[in-house]
Amino acid sequence: MLLDSPPPPPDPIAPPRRRALDNPRVLTLAVILLLGVLAAALWMPSVAGLDQALIGSEAVFYALAAVSLMLLLVLIAVLGRNIIKLWVESRRGAPFARFRAKLVAALLAMTIVPATLVLVIGSEFLRNSANRWFNVPVEKSLSAAKEIAKQYHSERQESASLRASWLATRLPPGDMDAGNIAPLQAVANNELATMRDGLIEIYQTVSTPGGLRDAVFLLALEAGAPPRDIVRASADRIAARVAASGRADMTEDTVGSGGV
């Protein structure tokens, strides 16, 4: 009796090869790589001692804009692929086509609605921040700067007046009447030693034939680097007014090199 041997078992069918995008290991590796790049972008400049201005440079801005555009294109491509695939499956009458359509619609809503809200809220926040930090503070800063400049000018003017009054009491009256320059110059040099930039001009009051008082220039000393375009005639005029009136007086002259 002849018995037929059983046929050999068929070769096992190899499972279909999954695509890289369907492989959980590849997706996990891609997510880890992306998180690593973001962490490096945040921490490497401070660790390496790079200039923080580099982060806000145009090169980084254009690089981030290019990455954002690429991610947007990838999102559009993935969504478009899923929509086309869903449309083809619905035309063929594939099972679970309606469920997949609802799933894709839910994913679209979960993607578009938050992105739209972030765009609207972010735009409004940036607009309000720009109005808050660039409109009102600029006006306040300008007014505060003007007030500080006015106060500084007033303090410097008062300081110069007090210094001139104190120096007038230190000058020897006998040497002033006799016109002795050396003692007057010694007192003026001691005062100039306390200045960084300054100019001292000393005048002597004399009587005119008409019985009036006039001012005669005696000496001028300077310290540091005062403006070179100071007009001597202005000092002569104010000295003549003070000598004629016998009262303290002051004036302001704007020099071409800047300052008052």
Image (tube, grey):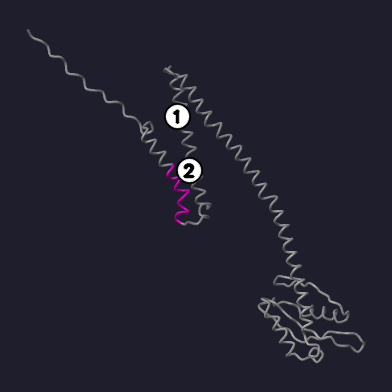
* Residue 179 point in image, percent of width and height: 79, 91
Image quadrant where one finds the N terminus: top left
Q: Residue at x 79, y 82 (%)?
A: 169
Q: Quadrant of residue 176?
A: bottom right
In the picture of the structure, the residue carrying the numbered disc 2 is 67
Measured from the top left, where is residue 147 in percent x and y? 74, 60
Q: Amino acid at mark 2?
A: Val
SS for callout 2: helix
- Residue drawn where x is 29% and y is 26% of the image: 15
**Is 129 positioned to the left or the right of 5 in the image?**
right
Find residue 163 and report its image quarter: bottom right
Separation of residues labelled 2 and 1 (CA atoms) = 21 Å
In the rendered image, the vertical position of residue 73 relative to residue 202, given as above or below: above
Say what secondary structure mark 1 lies in. Answer: helix
Q: Earlier in the sequence, mark 2 or mark 1?
A: 2
What range of the chain is rendered magenta?
35-48
Above or below residue 177? Residue 250 is: above
Residue lying at 71% horizontally and 60% vertically, measured from the top left: 145
Task: Give the amino acid type for the residue marked by disc 1 in the picture.
Answer: Arg
Query: For the C terminus, which image quadrant?
Result: bottom right
Question: Where residue 247 appears, x then y in whole percent?
Answer: 86, 77
Point out the residue furthest to the right here: 210
- Where does label 1 land, which residue? 81
- Give the left or right position of residue 78, taking residue 212 as reference: left
Horizontal relation, residue 70 to residue 26: left or right: right
Q: Which numbered disc covers residue 63?
A: none
